[in-house]
Amino acid sequence: MKNPKSFTTFLEGFNLGAILALISLGGALLNSQTIQIYSLILILIVTNGIVVGVVRQYLLIQLTLTKNMTRSFKQSKNQVPGRLLEMRNYKLADTLKLLVGISARLRMNMCGVLVLMLLLLLTLFLPTIYTYRLASDMMMFSLMWSFIFIIYTFKIIGEINHNYHYLQNQITYLLEIHQFNRAEMRQKQS
């Protein structure tokens, strides 16, 4: 896989989103009578492209991140990964605190994935609803392509979710093995 953080990844998603919106709004764009309708349709197309580009790039970044972390945890075979220990100068207590932070960050990233998925669904179906209002012939065609893209997106989210649960289970297991008390850590921070 290419670098998901690169700008070309966003541009590929933007092009995909713009094409999906253009499929459904193409007839309305050609038949628009006023500059306001024409501008509204162009804004919908650009917005759709931006949202699909951002969501796709975020999902690919999360997929790459969770795959790499999962591989690292699997290679360590129920031990604290060596790279994490190395990052904390081989101090187990500091590494366990880092694992707690990683666990919290993973939960936050999964919430971000869910919010972006809802935004993506709304964005993909907005042009379709607009074309339904205009009684466009391309509505079914655009719905089909939107569903195909949603299935592709759910496949990526499924992989992220699988990696997320594996990582959370491994972190919980490692914290239990080393008898790390999260409540005690919170009291020390207060």
Image: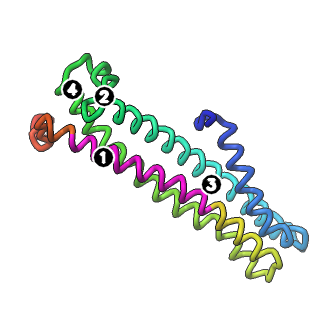
Residue depicted at x 27% and y 47% = 169
Determine the residue positioned at 45% across, 35% down: 68
Q: Magenta span covers which residues?
A: 150-173
Rounded to the nearest angstrom, the CA distance separating label 1 from label 2 is 14 Å
| Of the pair 2 and 8, the residue shown nearer to us | 2
C-alpha separation, residue under disc 3 versus residue under disc 2:
36 Å
The location of residue 102, given as percent across then percent down, is: 32, 38
Instruction: Give the quarter of the figure containing the C terminus.
Output: top left
| Other-residue count near label 4 (Cα within 10 Å), few / some / many at <14 / 14–19 / ≥20 | some
Q: Quadrant of the N terminus?
A: top right
Write down the residue under mark 2: 81
Q: Label 2's element?
A: loop
The image quarter in which residue 81 lies: top left
Q: CA distance from mark 3 to mark 4?
A: 39 Å
Q: Which residue is mark 1?
A: 168
Residue type at mark 4: give it: Asp
Q: Nearer the viewer, mark 3 or mark 2?
A: 2
